[in-house]
Image (cartoon, rainbow, N blue to C red):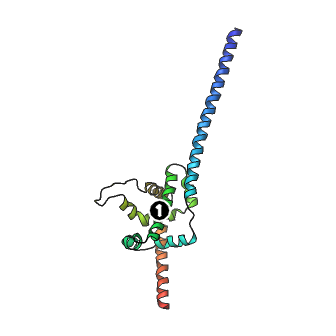
Amino acid sequence: MLMVELATLQAVSYLMGSLGVFVAAVYYIYNMRKAERDRRKQNILHRMPTMSREFYIWNLEVRHDPNLEQDWDKKYRVNPELESKVWHIMNVYNSLGILYVEGLMSLKEVTQLYSPGWIIGWYDKFEFLIKMLRYDSNGVLVYPEYMEPFERLVNDLRNRYPGVTMQQLTLGEEVKRLLESDATSKNSSQ
């Protein structure tokens, strides 16, 4: 009887040791995956540049350009400095989308870095360009994933903050009015 109890006790001891090793292995794998995700997030965030005040001013001017889609080729495409600024912001927002889609950042974290209105407003202004670059010259869809993380981020922001799109339209009208009154005052003073 004593031998059976000792054998049982020894089996339980081995089982507990094995369970401890198993738990340690699971914990190690979990921490390695978490560390890899954190490294990837930091790597992407580190590459995302900060934007200067001048860049924000330019951003506002572009976003409120009423003829942007019609003038894209003759105003921006021929000017490498202007076109590179547009692609710079597009890639910043697409990088945020990648972080969000891959679960490396929550929607709340994204909106703590950038206003949902800026992200949605920029997408709305340049949706024509994103859609255009998904198709070849014959109208065949060749790159459906182009800026897809940016697009998904915008759709989820619209769902979470439904009033932002209307707010952006209202702000756009207000900025347009201010720009027109500024242009009128400059013309009248000359």
Count of number-bearing discs: 1
Secondary structure of the residue carrying numbered label 1? helix
Q: Is residue 30 above or below residue 40?
A: above
Q: Classify mark 1: residues with Cα within 10 Å, few (<14), some (14-19) or many (20+).
A: some
Instruction: Please give left or right for residue 25 compared with residue 184 in the image.
Output: right
Can you give x and y, in whole percent of width and height, for residue 17 in the image?
A: 66, 25
Q: Nearer the viewer, residue 20 or 40?
A: 40
Residue 165 seen from this side: no
Look at the picture and state if 85 lies above or below 48.
Answer: below
Q: Residue at x 48, y 79 (%)?
A: 179
Q: Amino acid at mark 1?
A: Met
Q: Residue at x 58, y 56 (%)?
A: 46
Residue 34: % across, % down: 59, 43
x and y percent of residue 95 in the render?
50, 56
- Dividing the picture into quadrants, the one containing residue 74 is bottom left
Q: Residue 22: name its quadrant.
A: top right
Residue picked out by circle 1: 90
